[in-house]
Amino acid sequence: MTDRQADPQADLKTARLIEPTPLDQAHAAMMAAPEDDAARLRFYERIADVELFMLLEDEPQGDQISPVLLEDSYVMVFDRAARLSAHVGEASPYVALSGRAIAAMLEGQPLGMAVNIGVAPSEILLPAEALDWLRSTLAHAPGEVEAGIDQVFPPQGLPETLIAAIDAKLATATGMAAGAFLVGVEYTGGGRGHLLAFVGAIPRAQDALVRAASEALTFSGIEAGAMDVGFFGPKDAVVEKLARVGLRFDLPQMEPLQNTPRMAPGSDPAKPPKLR
């Protein structure tokens, strides 16, 4: 995947006119409240979730890529292609990956991320230690248990930050489930809590949905265990109760594909690109 500029000055103008991006907004909130752990967590959540355009020295060779390094210590990434173009000022190759994919790719390398350098208010240097922390946080895996549900009732007492985090996570879970409901539950044998119930999830997406819910908790600063995750078929009897009392989240659905494009390096999470 490459960026071919016809007019670098036009790209610079475009980069400056870009509306504040989610990363800009999260960065501004973090810088405005340096002692606010929740704001810092939200910024790192955005870094993990957004698509980043990583500047390369040359075109990818299969799954091998050669990132341009800043000060031999940082790969250079931008949250808009126009910002990358504005920084370089000429036609340049790049690869587009999520922040989490880039962090995973850099594991074992003494490299950080240089984000939006010189072209956006969200410019920041994230050292290798910061990416170590991000990888560790993203690698946290919740436990798995089975429990029967006796009662379902509306969710109560959950902070708005968690609701917003769930909504943001599921907005990127295209085609993974028909929908989701957040409810309060009382379990068979005792115990009450909150449940994020996915309806009609495709089996291969269940692990990703559990991770998304876990990250929503983590990056909201909420104690682990504040929310469980469950999966239900569209015809399960409990779904009617979930829809009646739960807070609904609509997941975006897949559109039919007319053509199958060539996959860019990093498009398959099971085959991340490799550094050359």
Image (cartoon, rainbow, N blue to C red):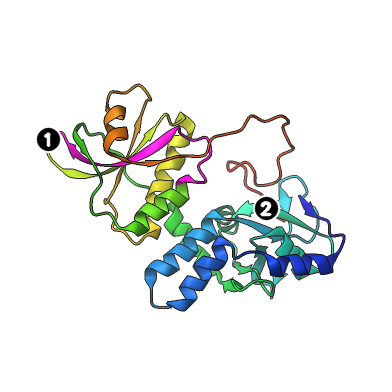
**Image coordinates for residue 57, horizontal then vertical, percent:** 78, 61
Q: Say above or below: 53 vs 252.
A: below
Tell me the distance, in whole angstroms, between the alpha carbons under discs 1 and 2: 49 Å
Q: From the image, tell me which residue sits under label 1.
A: 189
Mark 2: amino acid: Ala
Which portion, as a residue range, is magenta? Answer: 170-189
Task: From the viewer's perspective, tell me whether residue 53 is left or right of residue 187.
Answer: right
Going by the picture, which residue comes out furthest to the top?
235
Name the foreground residue: 236 vs 210.
236
Name the foreground residue: 266 vs 174.
174
Q: Say above or below: 227 vs 197.
A: below
- Quarter of the C terminus within the rendering: bottom right
81 part of magenta stretch: no
Name the foreground residue: 141 vs 214.
214
The local secondary structure at tag 2 comes to strand
**Image coordinates for residue 2, horizontal then vertical, percent:** 79, 53
Residue 31 makes an appearance in the image:
yes
Mark 1: amino acid: Gly
Residue drawn at x 37%, y 25% as measured from the top left: 233
Residue 140 makes an appearance in the image:
no
Name the foreground residue: 127 vs 34.
34
Which label was assigned to residue 96?
A: 2
Residue drawn at x 31%, y 59% as measured from the top left: 222
Q: Say above or below: 199 vs 121.
A: above
Quarter location, residue 62: top right
The local secondary structure at tag 1 comes to loop
